[in-house]
Image (tube, grey):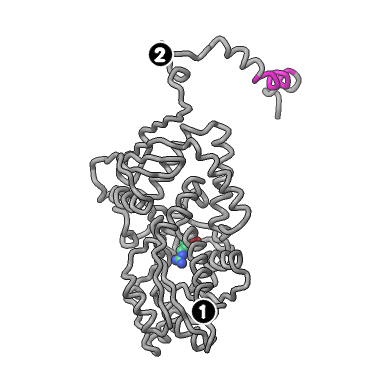
Amino acid sequence: MSDKVVLAYSGGLDTSVAIKWIKKKYNLDVIALTINVGNERDFSTIRQKALDVGAIKALVVDAKGSYVNEYVFPALQADALYEGEYPLATALARPLMAKLLVDTAREEGASVVAHGCTGKGNDQVRFEVSINALAPDLKIIAPAREWGMTREQTINYAQRYDIPVPITVASPYSIDENLWGRSIECGVLEDPWVEAPEEVFTWTRSVGEAPDKPEYVEIGFEKGIPVTVDGQQLDGVSLIQRLNELAGRHGVGRIDHLENRLVGIKSREIYEAPAATALLQAHQALEAMTLSKSQLRFKQKVAQEYADLIYNGLWFTRLHQDLAAYVQSSQRFVTGTVRLKLFKGGCPVVGRKSPFSLYNYGLATYDKADVFDQSASPGFIHIWGLPVKTQAQVQPVADSE
Ligand code: ARG
């Protein structure tokens, strides 16, 4: 009896060819594992295809709930945005997929796992570093990195072995999608000077087509987690789906990012992430109201570290656990409601409220309700400015070169 391998199976050309290729090259029985993270597809057809191509078993796991609750929401609480642009949809899904590969390998008694990533991207790193962290004993194979076939040769291989070639193969774009966002690469997008053509977008309307009337949406948060839309309680998956639709209709969440990959190259990426864009904006607005100035300053540094570690495949590390503990603690009072105005590609924050608001009307107002003691200001300025004054007396600023 041959040993078994669990393959992360998308149903696309590469992973379908991989089922056959692995069997021939390594003589391993392939168990196909398809993971649903909100990339809505016909999963029963995908499953059947895996079996038709030669998998001994084909599993489909609905992981939308764990994706949202264990990966996306912690990243939202951290305000993770890679290079200030990319909400990390793909990068967040990979550690979850790696974990499910490992779990399945254990259940099925397989000593090998496989993924369909090429040797040029970030995803191979995320898969393999995550697998190493969870199961250092498992062997990993990466057919699409090993076989050295061009796109055309892969199609020929498929035809030779009666593997159905999906019509999407005709599309010049490489697309990955899940609930938190959609990424589009290749084709004309590889010229960073060329504007992304309208055809690459499927979740968002163009600004021109977006409604001429603004729409308001209120998002309620509890401890940094979004729980309501316009007062209606929703589970995380439905909440994100609702916002993708709502914000997408107004053209919110198109991102054109010239990105620094972990493997050392710059690549041009187009993203659509309506819900992520709206939620990150709303969450930050609520933090601005409920965290102190110094908490906010420190948290911004954490946010960047957090985004980098997600991007760089370091989800299953002690560093992540440490940062996550800080983030959780920081969210204790991030409860309240934010109102966004969806209009022509933007979603500015136009209102916020919280039972834990640090905004104090009596201190802020210029009306008669003012309780701020202005007579204390001269003393404050005297001491605050003391080192500046002392230095200026001996080293006049005006004189300096
Ligand atoms: N550049 C993004 C990232 O590294 C998106 C990658 C999309 N992956 C893919 N296999 N098409 O997270």
For label 2, the residue is: 367
Q: Is residue 391 magenta?
A: yes
> Along the line of sight, which residue is nearer the eye, 137 or 50?
137
Q: Which quadrant of the view contains residue 167?
A: bottom left
Q: Is residue 255 magenta?
A: no
The C terminus sits in image quarter? top right
Is 227 situated above or below 337? below
Q: Which residues are magenta?
A: 384-393
At mark 1, the secondary structure is strand
Residue at 43%, 54% in the rendered image:
68
Measured Cα–Cα span from mark 2 to mark 1: 71 Å
Is 197 situated above or below 149? above
Residue 5 - label = 1
Q: Where does residue 173 sit, x and y in percent of width and height?
A: 39, 68
Q: Where does residue 92 sit, x and y in percent of width and height?
A: 48, 58
Is 143 situated above or below 334? below
Of the two numbered discs 2 and 1 on the same chain, state the one appearing first in sequence. Answer: 1
> Along the line of sight, which residue is nearer the eye, 132 or 66?
66
Disc number lying in front (2 or 1): 1
Q: Amino acid at mark 2?
A: Asp
